Image: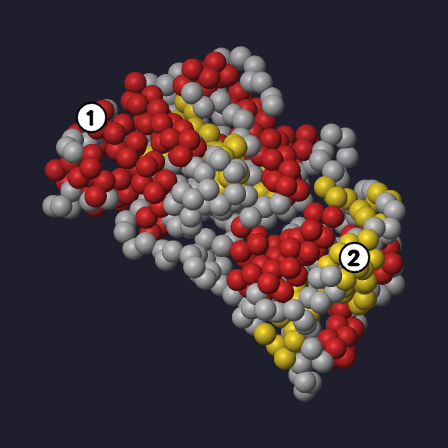
Amino acid sequence: DARHLATRAHARTRTRLAHGQAYMRASLARTPSVTRTRERIGRRGGQTIPMASTCGEFYRGHETLRVPFTLHAENRERLVQAMRSNGHGAGVIALKGGEQRTRYSTDNEPLFRQESYFHWAFGIAEGDCLGAIDVASGKCTAFIPRLPEEYAIWMGAIETTESFGARYGIDEVKYTDEMETWLAARKDTVYVLQGKNSDSGSTTEPVATPAGTFLMVDAEALFPIITELRTVKTKAEQKVLAYASAVSSRAHVEVIKSIEHGKMEYELESLFKHYCYSRGGMRNESYTSICAAGKNGATLHYGHAGAPNATEIKDGDFVLMDMGAEYHCYAADITTTVPCGGKFSADQKIIYEGVLAAHQAALAALKPGVSWTELQKLAERHILQALVAGGWLVGDVDEMHAKRVSATFMPHGLGHLLGIDTHDVGGYGLPGLPERSSEPGLKNCRTARVMQEGNAMTIEPGCYFIDILLDKALADDNIKHYFVADRVNACRNMGGVRLEDNVVVTADGCVSWTNVPRTVADVEAVMAGAPWPER
C-alpha cells in the first residue's frame, strides 16, 4: 500500500545520505515568502564581504509576524565577533542541526522542531542539516541532505541549493555528504559545540569531524561563548518574543472567559492551542500545557502523560493555567490563576493577592545589576507576609525567611531565562556565574545571575499547598511551630496560585510583554464578561 511504498522510499533515502552518519530525511516545510533585497555589503573584522542578495522571512500569513532571517545573520555576526574577542580569530564553527526521528520502531514521524543553538545561528526549519561559520570572514555555509527523487513524490519538490541559500540568506549551501571533505580541505581549527545544559543536565551533540586528518578540533571554546550570547536578546529577537507573548496572552484571556463548572481541564488546553495556531500561526506549544483545577494546582508540572489535564472543573476551584506557544521557535511562558465561578473566596483572595504582591515587587525591582537570588528572596518575603496575615503562619517573618519556611509554600525558583527554549540556556555553569545554592527553595532557582540589559526572563512567584512538603514541615521540630496546623490542613485542597509574566530587562528596569488580567477586580470583571483591552 501507499504507506509501505513510502516506507521503502524513505528507507532508500536514508541509505543514500551522508558519509557514515545516520541522517534521516529532512522535512522541507516551506516558508511562504521570500523578500528580494538589493545586494548588501557588510563589514566583518575589517574586511568587506558580500552579503546574500536575497533574504527570506518566517511568516505564517494574515496578521502574523514577519521575521526576517537577517535576525540570524545578526546572531552569526555577534558570534564571530565574540569568538575573535576571546582570542579565536581563525577557524570554522561547526553546528549540528536537529535530526528528524520516528516514534520508536514505527515510521510515525513526530513534528520536527529544530535544535535550538542551530536555530539561533541559522533559522533553518528543516531537519538533518549542518552549518558552518568561518570565523575570519564571517561567511556561513549550510549543508543539507541530498535527497533521492522519490522524495518529491511523498514530501514535495526537492529544493536546489541555490534556492535554499536564497530563502535563508545563507552564503553557500552544500550537501551533508560533502561536509567531511569540506572540513578536511580547510586544515584549520574546527570549533564544535559541546557542553552541558544546566536545566536538563544533558549535553549538546557536536558535529562529527573527519578522522585521520590534521584538523584541530576545539570542543571547549564555543559553548560558553554562544551560550552567553543567547542570554542577551537582540532587538529582533525581542520583537519575536513579544509577539509570542502577545498571542499567548490573548489566548489566556479567551480561556479565562470560557471557564465554567463541569468543563474538563483539557478543554482549556484545547482552546489555548486552537487560538494560538488559528490566530497567531503558532503551531508548537513552548511546553506541555498545565491546566490544573483545585488540588491539581499543587502539582507544579501537572499535565504530563500520567496526569493529562483530565479532571472536571468545579465551582470554587482555583484553576491554574501555565500555557505558552512559540513562534519561529521563540517561546512564551505565561501563567494565570482564576476561580471557577468568577469570584474569589476570602482565603483564595489572601493567597492570590500575596502572590500578586510578590509578582509586582519583583517586576518593580528587576533591572540591570540586580541579583536574581535577591529577587527570589524578595518574592518569598511577600508570600510569607500574606501567609502570616491570613493565619496560616505565626511568628517573625525574618526568622521564617532565614529558616527557609518559604520553600514549603514556594519550592520553585522565581523564574528563568526565556528564549528559543522555555527554560533558556545560560542559567549556570558559565565562567563568572554564581554557583547554584544548596538551600531549600533557592536550590531550585534556574539561575543566580546578576541581571543585564537584554535578558529575557519569566517572573513567576507561586504559593501552593503541597501535601508532601506540608507533612515534612509539620513534623520538623525546627520550623513546625510557625505553622497553624488546623488552618493549613483545611486548605490542602486549594491547590495553588502562580502568576507568570514574560519580561525583558531594559537599561533602567524591565518591560513585561504579558497582558492578562492580574488584580482580583480585573479577573472577576473579565470572568463576568467584561472586555480585556489588547495592547
- What residue do we see at 42% from left, 48% from top? 450
User: Mark 1: which secondary structure?
Assistant: loop
Colouring chosen for the image of the structure? secondary structure
Q: Quadrant of the C terminus?
A: top right
Residue 77 drawn above or below residue 302 = below
How many other residues sit within 10 Å of disc 1, few (<14), some (14-19) or many (≥20)?
some
Image-based side of 177 in relation to 475, left or right: right
- Most foreground residue, 453 or 168: 453
- Most foreground residue, 208 or 101: 208
- What residue do we see at 20% from left, 44% from top? 403
Which residue does the numbered mark 2 point to in the structure image? 170
Which residue does the numbered mark 1 point to in the structure image? 391
Dividing the picture into quadrants, the one containing residue 34 is top right
Label 1 is placed on what type of residue?
Gly
- What residue do we see at 68% from left, 85% from top? 214
Counting residues from the start of the chain, the first of labels 1 and 2 encountered is 2
Dividing the picture into quadrants, the one containing residue 434 is bottom left
Return the x and y of residue 160 as percentages of the image width and height. Answer: 87, 59
